Image (tube, grey):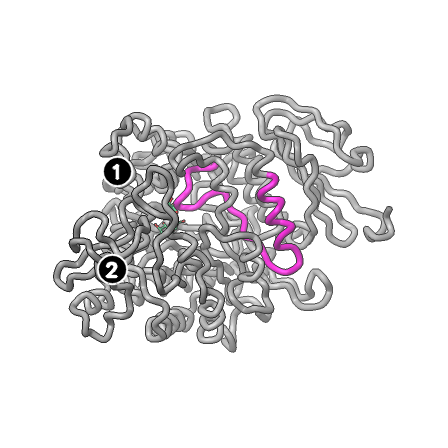
Amino acid sequence: MAVNGARGAAAETTTEAGPEAGPETTTEAGSDGARPDPWWKSAVVYQIYPRSFADSDGDGVGDLPGMERRLDYLAGLGVDVLWLSPVYPSPHDDNGYDISDYQGIDPVFGTLEDFDRLLAAVHTRGMRLVMDLVVNHTSDEHPWFTESRSGPDTPKRDWYWWRPAREGREPGTPGAEPNNWASFFSGPAWEYDPASEAYYLHLFSRKQPDLNWENPEVRQAVYAMMRWWLDRGVDGFRMDVINLISKDPALPDGAVRDGSPYGDGSPHYTCGPRIHDYLQEMHREVFAGRTGEPLLTVGEMPGVTVGQARLFTDPARAEVDMVFQFEHVGLDHGADKFDVRPLRLTDLKASLGRWQTGLDGTGWNSLYWNNHDQPRVVSRFGDDSGPYRVRSATLLATVLHLHRGTPYIYQGEELGMTNAPFSSVDDFRDIESLRYFAEAVAGGADPERVLAGLRAMGRDNARTPMQWDASRHAGFTTGEPWLAVNPNHTTINAAASVADPASVYHHYRRLISLRHDEPAVAHGDFTMLLPDDERVYAFTRRHARVELLVLGNFTGEDVRVDLPYGESWAGAELLLGNAPEAAGPLRTPVALGPWEARVHRRTVPAPRQEES
Ligand code: ISL
């Protein structure tokens, strides 16, 4: 996509954070000196989960005016793009990922006028706004589905996947579903509709019927809706489970796993037969030929492989700019995601390293630890227990943000927010956790064990309200929050973090500035070091004559490491670190304190090919 000038004027800012937001990060010449690099290669995205960000009217649910009041905080952090999880009208069976009207705003979040004002205020500050696009499914209360459900002969019948019961089975009874696929949220992926004596497919909840993308009318309706939002001024889309939209129309049974009543349907709907056609068509119909600001598109793609991602993100194929892949956030899963295993650092390095290499040159990575579906990273891969919370949160941030790709920060991650102390199942609100608990306990599992899994991995960990200050309900709402605020907000909150130069917040701010200012962060190549070391994450980034060395100690102990070619790094300047007591140039062998992270920089004398 072409690189244009800035949208609006980047607001003058009086904070130390600086105005480096958004379009200011555009690079004119490409890193290879030829094609201009897209602006999003040096951008950082911040995800807002609207329900839990800021409530302006005391109903206990975050809203658009609340968000608008907090924009200066986000501009101060220096992020370039805001991505909003869904704010459209919805019955909220899955917190807005079940949409009943694609072209409106749910009253709980505000009005279209509130949205337009928010968008203008984001642009005034030099940032961009990306919407969530949820088009694998609608809500069952969407008029498209209401009409589709009204009878077999309605013109919209074929907009969804309707199938008769399995042959020889009594419709509506267990085992009579048209195939053996499971829903992501427990139970079968089919719901029986007695009125029309047929089943409809729902890969998620039964209130999220899957759209039939085989039908060209469905696709055109989606593209028209996307154009409507772009005409309104939004700057792109994060596309929910977009690699699930193409199903094998035969909807075959999946292979049955031992002991499970369900088969694995994923080979028949993950990156299905027409997925590339659909995304290329979407690009032609929605994005190609648009004048004005360049956009950002990111496809959420559970189960995507590196090879597939390379195709999806190859600019020459015009599909999406980048994808969210799931490999690294599955490394601590056992039999399922609630069966938690300890993370092996070598597995993490092997996985992220493979993605770095796999998308090098052709595609582009998105980088994330957290989003609204994942537990808090400081609790998951760091140490949230007290003395090392700040150290481990800043180490994780440093390692992630120094990879090649576009980093995503999930609200509160920049404060080092932690998992929540849920004491009983009644504390959870998420459909996934509640359904999983009910199904596991009904199947004879020990409720305490199931609860332990939910505490570690449940999505509500990410969804507790943003911790703005130490006051009641953390300054999130004056009413009763829809999900309890984490009691640790009295010490972990934005007001305290902004005031403390050694906080997690200021570390994120420095990482974002570094990406804007140092081309090697956005554009440098990537070389993993010490792949077999279980304690230290180490890699280099190189761009032109600048080389960066990133080191992170993933343990709570002092470590000493010998680096390959370590002596050549001796004396390299420290660009950024999380342990002030260790300031100064690099000494080898390197000694790292508990959860210490360092980024060193050196200038290399000659291009790599002449070096050896
Ligand atoms: O969290 C998950 C279940 O373990 C993931 O599999 C998740 O459902 C998957 O990443 C898809 O997520 C997206 O689509 C869902 C929605 O519930 C998630 O919040 C959304 O991010 C259905 O729209």
Task: Name the element at disc 1.
Answer: helix
> Residue at the location (71% across, 68% down)?
34
Q: Which mark is residue 509?
A: none
Instruction: Locate residue 579, reporting x and y percent.
Output: 62, 30
Tell me: residue 498, above or below residue 175. Answer: above
Q: Residue furthest top?
A: 557
Instruction: Locate residue 540, reporting x and y percent.
Output: 70, 43
Q: Which mark is residue 439?
A: 1
Q: Residue furthest front?
A: 168
Q: Is residue 270 left or right of residue 589?
A: left
Residue 54 magenta-drawn?
A: no
User: Is residue 498 visible in this depiction of the protein?
Assistant: no
- Residue denoted by label 2: 200
- Looking at the rendered structure, the number of numbered marks drawn on it comes to 2
The answer to whether the residue bearing label 1 lies less than 8 angstroms from the nearest atom of ligand 1 is no
Q: Which quadrant holds residue 535?
A: top right
Task: Name the element at disc 2.
Answer: strand
Q: Is residue 177 left or right of residue 126?
A: left
> Residue at the location (73% across, 65% down)?
33
> Residue at the location (35% across, 63% down)?
250
Instruction: Locate residue 380, reporting x and y percent.
Output: 46, 33
- Circle 1 crowding by C-alpha within 10 Å: few under 14, some 14–19, many from 20: some
Tell me: residue 213, above or below residue 578. Answer: below
The three-letter amino acid code for the residue at tag 2 is: Tyr
The three-letter amino acid code for the residue at tag 1 is: Glu
In terms of sequence position, does the residue under pointer 1 or pointer 2 come before the other?
Answer: 2
Q: CA distance from mark 1 to mark 2?
A: 21 Å
Give the extent of the magenta segment.
Answer: 349-377
- Circle 2 crowding by C-alpha within 10 Å: few under 14, some 14–19, many from 20: many
Dots 1, 2 in contact, CB < 8 A: no
Q: Which quadrant holds residue 209?
A: bottom left
Q: Quadrant of the N terminus?
A: bottom right
